[in-house]
Image (tube, rainbow, N blue to C red):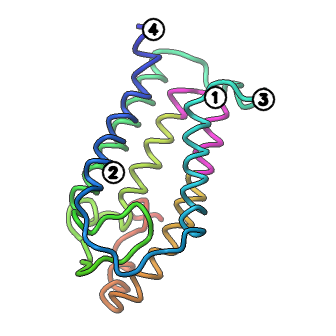
Amino acid sequence: MEIVYKYLIPGLWACWAVYWWIASRDVKVSVREESALSRFAHIGPLLFAALLCALPDWPLAWLGARFLTPGAASFAFGASLLAAGLAFAVWARFVLGRNWSGTVTLKDGHELIRRGPYRWVRHPIYTGLLGAFVGTAVAIGQWRAVLAVVIVCVALWRKLRLEERWLSEKFGAAYARYREEVAALIPFLL
C-alpha cells in the first residue's frame, strides 16, 4: 500500500502532463500572444505551486504541518478528486481542439466553443486544474498544498481575466451573451 501513497499522485500528474505535451503539438497558428512577462505572471506561480506539492521538505516548518490526519479515506478522496479534475481538464482540452494554447493567445480562425464542458463553465480547464490541486491538497494533507491551491487560484484568476478581455474583444456580443449564460469556473456560482 505504501507504493500507492508514494506514486499515485505524481503518477496521475505525470500522465496528465504527457497528454498535455502531446496535445500541444497540434494547435492553430497564433495571431495574438500575451507578452513574455504576462506569461511568466501566471506560469511562474503555477510552477511554484507544483513544487510546493511535489517537494515535501521546506525550510518553513508550518508548510509541512498537517491540516488533515493521514489516512486511507482522505488519501482516496483526494486522489479521486485529483483524477476527476484532471479528466475534466483533458475533456475540455480535447473539445477545445486546435484553438488551445497554454498561454493567452488568439488563434487564426479562433472559434468560440460552447459544447462539452464549455456548456457549464467558460474555463473548464481551469476548473479541472483547480479541482486537481484541491484533490492533491487533500491527499497530501499538509499546509504546503493548501498554499499551492491559493497560488493556483490567484494565477488562474489573473489569466482568466486577461482571456475574458481578449475573447470579449474578438467575439463581441456573442461572448457577452456567453458570459451572461455560463459561469466562469463553478456552474451557477462563479
10 Å crowding of disc 2: few (<14), some (14-19), many (20+): many
Q: In the rendered view, tell whether residue 8 sits above or below residue 147.
A: above
Q: What segment is highlighted magenta in the picture?
A: 137-151
Q: Which mark is residue 110?
A: none
Distance of label 4 from label 2 (alpha carbons): 28 Å
Residue at (47, 49) in percent of width and height: 130
The residue wearing badge 3 is: 59
Q: Amino acid type of disc 2? A: Ala
10 Å crowding of disc 3: few (<14), some (14-19), many (20+): few
Distance of label 4 from label 1 (alpha carbons): 18 Å
Residue at (42, 20) in percent of width and height: 7
Distance of label 4 from label 3 (alpha carbons): 25 Å
Helix, strand or loop at mark 2: helix
Residue 106: percent from the left, percent from the top?
Answer: 36, 78
Q: Amino acid type of disc 4? A: Glu
10 Å crowding of disc 1: few (<14), some (14-19), many (20+): many
Q: Amino acid type of disc 1? A: Gln
